[in-house]
Amino acid sequence: MFEAASIDQAALDRLVLGRAQSQFLPDVVQNDAALRDVVQGARILVVGGGGTIGSATTALISRFSPAALHVVDQSENYLAELVRDVRGRSEGLTVSDFRTLPLDYGAPIMGRFLAEAKPYDIVLNFAALKHVRSEKDVYSLLQMIDTNVVRHIRFKRWLQDHGHARRYFAVSTDKAANPTSLMGASKRLMEDIVFDIAVSQGGIATSARFANVAFSNGSLLQGFMYRLSKGQPLAVPRDTRRYFVSQAESGEICTLASLLGGHDQVLFPLLDPVSQLQPLEDVAQRVLMQLGLEAVPFDDEEAARAALPSLAAGKRWPLLLTPLDTSGEKPYEEFVGHGERVLESGLQTLGAIEHVPSAALAGGVITMLEDAVSRVDGDLDKPAIVAAIQSAIPGFSHRETGRNLDQRL
């Protein structure tokens, strides 16, 4: 069977990304003085800062000498690892006022904390339910809407009420561009909240749409490593292409977007659709090859499981290829939606679009969603929720197939 100790993570990153050096680090280096000018002496709050993207961004920003760096995340384990990581670096932790708090960013305790805290100059928000599988039933859908939309509204209003965030940033997703999933639509609604729920007087609000972060928490590629260590087949959808960035690059993208982005701009990585939009089947095959294993394709889950022991004995591994027929999944990634205008960002590696407000806030859709999330009784009608969101978001074309990702490997 496969030995986890044989993994060279840096080599796997290079293999998947097709580059040995960060694509975005040159912008960080070139803009070092500008970044330091924004961060040095500032009080910074990072929400959802224990996850892959949040922790990479926190670690990078800590190098620019903020006066205070406070990190909120619901996961105690993520926060513990973040502290160990930044303290274990060669230079150690150089921020004197560094705190981690295991809080839900939309819960009343967070409101109390913000009411009593000295105002934060910069607030970065990474809290989200980010998987398409989270729309598999109406209860999971409501939780996703609550996390990505309703609690975000509450959080933004607390910031406004207590004088926080002259600069505000929240991470979005590529799936917010011409969304086909309810997850992507919820993040498109979140973009409205970032820009249309007021920031402080003269403040700046930005966001960033993202590629897949290779081997990040909960990602398909991290799942490859788990499947291998557990002696289980790998699985990918057919005819599906994705962009990838590394975990370090995710922090660089968010640092640049949050600290140097212009007001009302959604920034995105400038990736080449010809050379960098990769078929997932090819990525899986290359990962297996890097680990000394030959991929053997299957289209039946039971057959793939049954064949694994004999294949593994010969340094071969089953790769299950599934149809792209689950609700909301897109066959490819894009960063710019219909009717969105591309702008110069002032950065070499990031583009920008000007935020186009949807009709959700003015049309009462957000109010309806807030009511649906807060009620403990009454009918729950998923088609009505989908129709309301669809009426408000330009380019939203939901694919409801009756199948979800929990129904396959």
Image: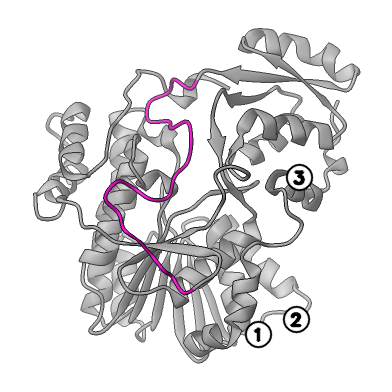
Q: Position of residue 345 (x, y in %)?
A: 43, 70
The residue singled out by tag 3 in the image is 15
Magenta highlight: main SS: loop
Q: Position of residue 130 (x, y in %)?
A: 44, 45
Which residues make up the magenta segment? 324-346
Above or below residue 194? Residue 147 is: above
Q: Does 39 sit left or right of 3 as displayed? A: left
Tell me if residue 13 is in the magenta stretch.
Answer: no
Residue drawn at 50 percent across, 92 percent down = 41
Specify whether residue 45 is in view: no
Q: 26 or 320, which is in the foreground?
A: 26
Residue drawn at 43 percent across, 55 percent down = 209
Q: Does 23 sit left or right of 201 as displayed? A: right
The residue singled out by tag 2 in the image is 91
Q: Secondary structure at mark 2?
A: loop
Look at discs 3 and 2 and give the one toward the viewer.
3
Tell me whether the residue at label 1 lies in contact with that at label 2, contact meaning CB atoms closer than 8 angstroms: yes
